[in-house]
Image: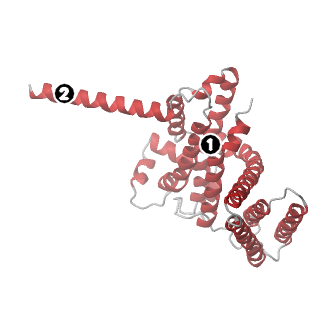
């Protein structure tokens, strides 16, 4: 009798949990409003792919290719079957970086190679997912607003399956070259996003100043002063960054050329903005700071050790934080900006 009651209660609780989970998924990821698209859910899936890429690179890859300590994976990876297969799949293409002892050691180029290849798994599958979704939406537009719980489930299932797939040829072969092209496109798109954000920021504060002046003359001065202060801060950071780039990476022809072109571009763009009627100094200052970031990204990835003092120091927290911050801003703009809403959903 007791076991029957326990079974009934367990079934009831299981049903309630499943129903609640289904309702939550439907509420968060289900069909969107007929007047909108699934753009925000797409952004959430992209954010999930970025999070998974970080987990794969900094948690899962070190566990799989870690040193010969007493970790649980050391036993699993040497066992016949799945463990050995996964270890071979994640280290495929990294054999040239393997230490002399044959084991992966934390912080070595061998582990770095496997970690970098791990990033391509969730990101490649996100690219594949959106390529297929785009083709399907072209033939059936309403699909962009439907069955998002199933879409997320399919993507996560594919990511789980990718753990058992070798790096080559798809991840560190085909997608590596596609990613380079996509990165160039993303830099252009990100530049447009920075310009749009800065223009909207400037227009919003100028509008607040005008509104305050209409209510009481002179009250809008604070908003204009704040705008100038932000411009000054951005320009100060940009020129300070230029100075540090010359100090850290200068003395090498290619680096000096990149840094100097960045400096000339900052001065030129600012001059053009100031000479126009509808110029926005806040936009120029934001783009100047972004240009310095791009210059730093270029010189800090110089493969010549004589030109790059950071060469060999993987996992720089500053690089990771800046990259993630810009990515978060870009994703937020695509998902929630009113300007993006007008541009991306226009007929």
Q: Residue furthest left?
A: 1
Q: Residue furthest front?
A: 216
- Say left or right for 181 vs 168: right
Q: Which residue is mark 1?
A: 335
User: What percent of the width, then of the height, locates residue 181?
Assistant: 77, 46
Q: Quadrant of the N terminus?
A: top left
**Residues at discs 1 and 2 in contact (Cβ within 8 Å):** no
Does 147 sit above or below residue 330?
Answer: above
For the residue pair 324 and 347, the one nearer the viewer reads as: 347
User: What percent of the width, then of the height, locates residue 136?
Assistant: 66, 24
Q: Residue furthest top?
A: 139
Q: Which of the marked residues, 1 or 2, is nearer the chain's N terminus?
A: 2
Does 83 sit above or below residue 31?
Answer: below
Q: Secondary structure at mark 2?
A: helix
How dense is the environment of label 2, judged by Cα within 10 Å: few (below 14), some, or many (20 and up)? few
Q: Which-is-in-front pick, marks 1 and 2? A: 1
Residue 89 in view: no
User: What percent of the width, then of the height, locates residue 118?
Assistant: 58, 49
Q: Quadrant of the C terminus?
A: top right
How dense is the environment of label 1, judged by Cα within 10 Å: few (below 14), some, or many (20 and up)? some
Its colouring scheme is secondary structure
Q: Which numbered circle lies on residue 7? A: 2
């Amino acid at each position: 009798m007791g076991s029957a009651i326990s079974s009934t209660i367990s079934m009831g609780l299981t049903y309630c949990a499943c129903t609640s989970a289904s309702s939550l998924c439907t509420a968060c990821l289900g069909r969107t409003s007929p007047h909108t698209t699934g753009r925000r859910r797409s952004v959430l899936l992209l954010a999930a792919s970025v999070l998974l890429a970080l987990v794969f690179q900094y948690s899962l890859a070190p566990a799989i290719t870690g040193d010969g300590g007493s970790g649980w994976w050391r036993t699993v990876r040497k066992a016949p079957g799945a463990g050995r297969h996964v270890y071979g799949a994640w280290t495929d293409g990294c054999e040239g970086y393997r230490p002399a002892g044959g084991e992966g050691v934390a912080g070595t180029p061998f582990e770095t190679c496997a970690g970098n290849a791990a990033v391509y798994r969730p990101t490649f599958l996100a690219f594949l997912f959106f390529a297929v979704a785009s083709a399907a939406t072209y033939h059936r537009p309403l699909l962009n607003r439907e069955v998002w719980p199933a879409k997320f489930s399919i993507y996560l299932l594919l990511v789980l399956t990718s753990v058992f797939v070798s790096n080559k040829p798809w991840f560190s072969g085909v997608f590596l070259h596609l990613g380079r092209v996509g990165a160039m496109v993303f830099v252009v798109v990100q530049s447009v996003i920075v310009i749009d954000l800065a223009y909207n920021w400037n227009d919003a504060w100028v509008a607040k100043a005008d509104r305050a002046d209409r209510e009481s003359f002179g009250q809008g001065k604070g908003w204009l002063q704040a705008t100038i202060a932000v411009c000054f801060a951005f320009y100060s950071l940009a020129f300070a960054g230029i100075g540090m780039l010359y100090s850290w990476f200068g003395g090498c022809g290619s680096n000096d050329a990149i840094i100097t072109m960045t400096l000339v571009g900052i001065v030129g763009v600012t001059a053009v903005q100031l000479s126009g009627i509808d110029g926005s100094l806040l936009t120029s200052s934001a783009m100047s700071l972004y240009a310095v970031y791009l210059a730093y990204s270029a010189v800090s990835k110089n493969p010549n050790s004589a030109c790059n003092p950071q060469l060999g120091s993987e996992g720089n927290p500053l690089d990771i934080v800046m990259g993630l911050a810009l990515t978060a801003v870009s994703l937020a703009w695509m998902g929630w900006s009113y300007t993006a809403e007008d541009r991306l959903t226009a007929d």
